[in-house]
Image (tube, rainbow, N blue to C red):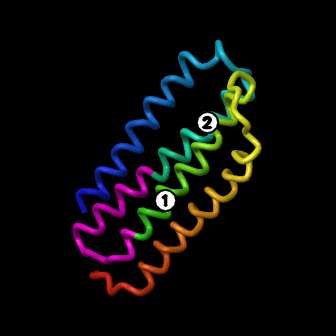
Amino acid sequence: MKAILLTGAVFCLFAVVFGAFAAHGLKQFITPNSVETFQIGVRYQFYHGLAILFCGLWYKIEPISNLKITTLLFSIGILLFSGSLYLLSFKSIILLPLGLVGPATPIGGAFFIAGWASIIFTVLKTKLVN
């Protein structure tokens, strides 16, 4: 449970740091379009970091092993989806071959979808106290 909460908190912390960087320092290095792409990555990282925190709190109340899988799905989604958007935002100044980065974005999105489906599955299979 502690690892889940820590994971969510770290992702949220970096979402705030990256968001501040995008708002205050990034505009001088990349185009406005690329800043928007970067901010989309930040938003989705924040949403899913909060979702991981939710999973950690739920796990504390009821230790359902599926919540660990959900956390993993969201974490992979953040790394692939948000991470690829961060890299793609810098494509004009990074000298890395970014051909493999583009496909990572929808794959990361698929992990987000799988994470939310996992939560739905967990809600449906769990006896929740009214």
Whole-percent x and y of residue 58?
Answer: 30, 67
Residue segment shown in magenta:
49-68
In space, the residues marked 2 and 1 are separated at their CA atoms by 17 Å
Q: Which residue is mark 2?
A: 86
Whole-percent x and y of residue 123?
Answer: 42, 79
Quarter placement of the N terminus: bottom left
Choose top left, top right, bottom left or bottom right for residue 85.
Answer: top right
Q: Which residue is mark 1?
A: 74
Q: Say which element carries label 2.
A: helix
Choose top left, top right, bottom left or bottom right for residue 59.
Answer: bottom left
Amino acid type of the residue tagged 2 in the rendering: Tyr
* Vertical comparison of 80 with 40: above or below: below
Q: Which mark is residue 116?
A: none
> Is 23 or 95 nearer to us in this picture?
95
Q: Is residue 10 left or right of residue 119?
A: left
Whole-percent x and y of residue 53?
Answer: 35, 55
> Is 23 or 31 nearer to us in this picture?
31
Amino acid type of the residue tagged 1 in the rendering: Phe
Q: Which residue is drawn at the image coordinates 41% and 62% (left, top)? A: 71
* Residue 51, magenta (yes or no): yes
Q: Say which element carries label 1.
A: helix
* Residue 89, magenta (yes or no): no
Mark 1 closeness class: few <14, some 14–19, many ≥20 residues within 10 Å: many
Quarter placement of the C terminus: bottom left
